[in-house]
Image: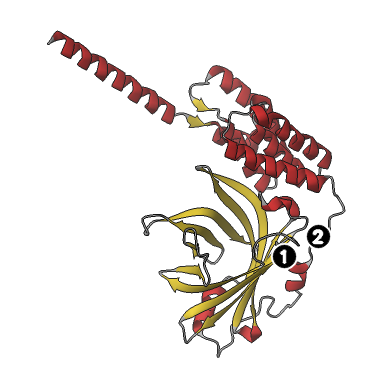
Amino acid sequence: MEKRYTKLIIFIGLTTLLFLSNFLFAQKKPIAEVLYRTISQEGIEAAVKKYDNLKTKKNGEYDFSEGQLNNLGYRLLNEGKSEAALEVFRLNVKVFPKSPNTYDSLGEAYMKTGDNKMATINYENVLAVLPNASINEQQKQFLKQNAEAKLKILKNPNAVESHYLNDFLAPNTENPFGKLHPDAPPETEQWGQMAGVWECTNFAFVNGQWFSGWKATWAWRYILDGFAVQDVWHQKQENLPPPSANLPRDFVGTNVRIYDHAKKKWQVMWFHNGQILGGSGNATNQFEAEFIDGQIIMTPVNPPATGPQTRIVFHNITKDTFDWKSETLGEDGETWTATFKIQGKRVR
């Protein structure tokens, strides 16, 4: 009987200890928020000093993980605070010198600010530390492809930039993005509401976690005198995600979308310049789409004979924002899982 009670007391003690440790860990405060406020109020130098001070004196109170500084760096970079972003990424490299992802982020920041020399050094550092990095093989391959592609761009400064987007948005002061024709099906406005220019951020789900970045511009307008909608996706070569990053040019694609009143569905045709001569893959795709409960759901007209079913969903559509996701149907035939996402923010 005493042994049973002893075992019970030990079990309760260990369970309580585990609960408390998890609770305390979960309660760690994000250091990124403290640093962001400090940068806003006192500047980046004060923030770096505060980071060092808190890490020394209150290490158990704050979350000092690599992701905290990485996310803060991108937040600052997206807000146009490039010098502060670079300093944060440099700090992350200093704290985590064996992490290829810290060099990858710093390389991207240098590339975006036009310092190709430092960008090259940091992408080369990615490849140098990758073999001994404590990450899985899929993550290593992801970072390797990205670094090699960026180095290829950095060492080829004479790459031709696409001007198709500018041609698509030819000046028109009265109706720069066209307008709905009064005789067109009213459903045409389901996608017509997107007319304008959007800045987009991509998110890829790789090995159980989401990676973000790869900025793009997505422009929309009415065509065919307001009976259809066309959009142009433009992604600069340096912003392409792996494995598309090996494309030796800017990536440009366009959808032509028209509502088929007889079928009560949208007919969508996608064309792009992503196909490399002699390579594999389709240069076009055809979809049908429906507006259901505030979402626009696109399904392939000719899906592959093998492999899981896929679809594209536009959702959370407002005047100035939207979400896009590519989904795959699970083996249960009911559950859809997102594998790639886009967040759009209107700029015009």
Q: Is residue 203 visible?
A: yes
Identify the residue shown where x is 60% and y is 47%.
212
For the residue pair 264 and 293, the one nearer the viewer reads as 264
Q: Looking at this view, name the residue that lies furthest to the left.
A: 1
Coordinates of residue 50 in the picture (x, y in percent): 61, 25
For residue 76, above or below residue 230: above
Which amino acid, mark 2? Glu
Which amino acid, mark 1? Asn
Identify the residue shown where x is 65% and y is 86%.
225
For mark 1, give the secondary structure: loop
For mark 2, give the secondary structure: loop
Coordinates of residue 325 in the picture (x, y in percent): 52, 58
Identify the residue shown where x is 73% and y is 30%.
128
Coordinates of residue 62 in the picture (x, y in percent): 51, 27
**Quarter of the figure with the N terminus:** top left
**Quarter of the figure with the C terminus:** bottom right
Label 2 crowd (10 A; few <14 / some 14-19 / many >=20): few
Q: Is residue 316 visible?
A: no
Give left or right: position of 79 versus 183. Answer: right
Give left or right: position of 205 versus 7. Answer: right
Residue 7, quarter of the rendered image: top left
Coordinates of residue 285 in the picture (x, y in percent): 60, 69
For residue 327, above or below residue 65: below
Q: Which of pointers 2 and 1 lies earlier in the amino acid sequence?
A: 2
Residue 32, quarter of the rendered image: top right
The residue indicated by pointer 1 is: 273
For the residue pair 306 and 34, the one nearer the viewer reads as 306
Q: Looking at this view, name the residue that lies furthest to the bottom.
A: 183
Residue 161 has which mark?
Answer: 2
Residue 251, quarter of the rendered image: bottom right
